Amino acid sequence: MDTDQFQAPTNTAQRSRRGLWIVAGALALGVIVLVLILRASSPAQAETSDMSLQGGEGVWAVNGVELVRSQDALQVSLKIPRPMPGEYTYPPAETPAGDPTPPVGVGESEVFTLWMFVFNHPELCRDPYTCRLVDIFGDDETPEPPAAGGIYQLSAIIATGNIIEMNGEVTVGTDPARGALLTNTLCSHVHIGMAPHGEALDGEDLEIQMSTTIGGPAFFWAAEFEFLDSSNGC
């Protein structure tokens, strides 16, 4: 019997099965790569936090601040009732470091600035996971704080209505106003502070109001965010 007539179909069937497996493997690999790309590029789930009353005691606005973390940025959105003129405590006309600022007074149009305080390694704060300004500025005991905290300005506004809305973003590698660069978006502790500057002035004074912090945390409306959860590897 001539067996050659049976050989060709067998080889063809084997080649077909091998081709199907190669195609299936390539498709599966493509799906895995696509999932990994989407996972890496998609922002983490948004977090919300209450905005505290001025000075940190009590709640001024429930879920007034939203933070979105991604691999390379922190995005903040704030929407809260406006502190009305003359109905809150005005800071002295000086920065937290004691440098003079433009005069602070009551006015129909008032300036507020929004700031982010980021602690890249909250586990290394002097009081672990309870980070404070000493973990940014340091002191004689720890001139270079290991928590690597940094301060960034997010936004500024001349408020005239009943609602304040501000947004801002800090990306990895952005130069801070003070302290360390942002390097850890997913596992950092993030504090948000809104500072009051009083009546909106003119010219250079207004520029300083819109770009300088004032008074310190005792005069801020504030919100805090811890890292999301262990799924981020924190």
Image: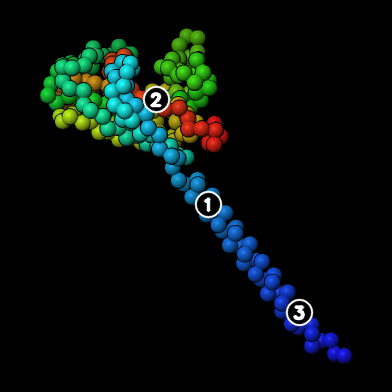
**For the residue marked with disc 1, what is the amino acid?**
Val
Q: Quadrant of residue 116?
A: top left
Disc tally is 3
Residue nearest the observer in this picture, 4 or 208: 4
List the residue tagged with mark 2. 224
Extreme-top residue of the structure = 140
Disc 2 residue type (three-letter): Glu
- State the image coordinates of residue 130 (x, y, percent, origin top left): 46, 18
> Could you tell which of marks 3 and 1 lies nearer the N-terminus?
3
Question: In the image, residue 93 lies at what x, y percent?
Answer: 22, 14
Q: List the residue tagged with mark 1.
A: 35
Instruction: Name the colouring of the figure.
Output: rainbow
Q: Position of residue 90 (x, y in %)?
A: 21, 15
Looking at the image, the residue that sits furthest to the bottom is 1
Q: Are marks 2 and 1 in contact (CB under 8 Å)?
A: no
- Specify which label sits upstream in the sequence, 2 or 3: 3
Tell me the residue at 41%/17% (across/down): 133
Tell me the crowding category of disc 1: few under 14, some 14 to 19, or many 20 or more residues within 10 angstroms, Cα based.
Answer: few
| Dot 2 or dot 1, earlier in sequence | 1
Identify the residue at horizontal 62%, vertical 67% (top origin): 23
Please say if the residues under marks 2 and 3 sit with CB atoms less than 8 Å apart: no
Circle 3 residue: 10
Can residue 22 be seen at all in this image of the molecule?
A: yes
The reply, left or right, for residue 91 in relation to residue 201 is right
- Secondary element type, mark 1: helix
Within-10-Å neighbours for mark 3: few <14, some 14–19, many 20+: few
Which of the 4 image quarters holds residue 46? top left
